[in-house]
Amino acid sequence: MAEQFLSRLTEIESSIASLGETLKRMVTLLSALNEIKSEVRIATEQIMTAIQTIPQTQAQAGVQEATLATIRGDLASLNTSVNSALESFRQEMQTMVQNIPVPASAPIAAPPTTPTPAPAPTPAPAPAQVAPAPVEAPIVTSGSLSPHGSMGIAAQLEAIVATLKMGCKAGTVLDQMASSKAEIIKIVPSDPIMVKIDKWNGIVAAVPRRKELQARDILKIKKEMKKEIKRYQPA
């Protein structure tokens, strides 16, 4: 099919080339006809002028009129020939244009259909691995402390209470809390008293280190801390 389409295109190119040559020939002939018509017109005017300037008798006037009629007839015949030639060229051009082959649109071959591969089966998700729960270290509470350990914690709490005096600076109390907490950790790695110390530390830390603690904060912390000291003192 593609070869036939290319063959038709070649025929069209040949026809267009032939048409171009005919057009060139027609232009050349038209130019020649225009020159002939111009020369005939000039010659006719010259003849008629020459005839009119010759002295004439009555008999010669009749000859002159016959000559002029002949010239007019020849001019009309020439115009008829020119028009006939032009009409012939027009018909020839029309025939050539009509005979130009029109190429039929070549059918476009559909691309080969590629079969769509079936989607691979989705593998079932593996069962989630449940991580074993971390084994927490047992929390040592005051109930499991030795009497010596309980007394050590009570002594560290009393050291903090000793700094809680009216007019005490926040920095002094914070330093003692940090020191007492470090000593308690040496006695027991974990104990509920650590949470209480962190809470009291937050109250004091809200005040600039060089500022004095408010009386209400001092009384509150001392009251709670003395209650804890009784729990760690042996009965």
Image (cartoon, rainbow, N blue to C red):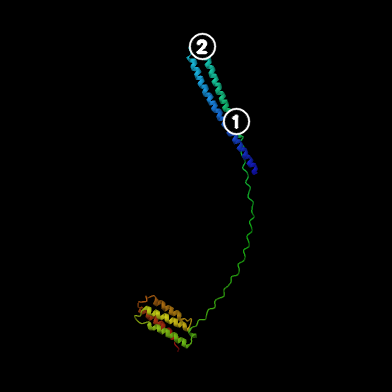
Is residue 43 left or right of 201 when viewed as pictured? right
Residue that extends furthest to the left in the rendered view of this protein = 167
Q: What amino acid type is highlighted by mark number 1?
A: Glu
Question: Looking at the picture, how far across and down is residue 109, in whole percent?
Answer: 63, 47
Asked which secondary structure carries label 2, the reply is helix
Residue at the image point whose x is 46% and y is 88% from the top: 148
Q: Would you say residue 231 is visible in this rendering?
A: no
Residues at marks 1 and 2, CA–CA distance in whole angstroms: 48 Å
Residue on which disc 1 sits: 92
Percent position (x, y) of residue 186?
47, 83
Q: Secondary structure at mark 1?
A: helix
Is the residue 108 above or below the residue 148 in the image?
Answer: above
Crowding at mark 2 (Cα within 10 Å: few <14, some 14-19, many 20+)? few
**8 and 131: which is toward the camera:** 8
Q: Residue at x 58, y 33 (%)?
A: 21
Whether residue 39 is visible:
yes
Q: How far from the left and from the top, in percent, is residue 11?
A: 62, 38
Tell me: residue 200, above or below residue 126: below
Cβ–Cβ under 8 Å for marks 1 and 2: no
Look at label 2 and name its amino acid: Gln
Residue sitting at x 52%, y 23%:
39
Residue 8 left/right relative to 158: right
Q: Which residue is mark 2?
A: 60
Residue at the image position 57 percent from the left and 24 percent from the top: 81
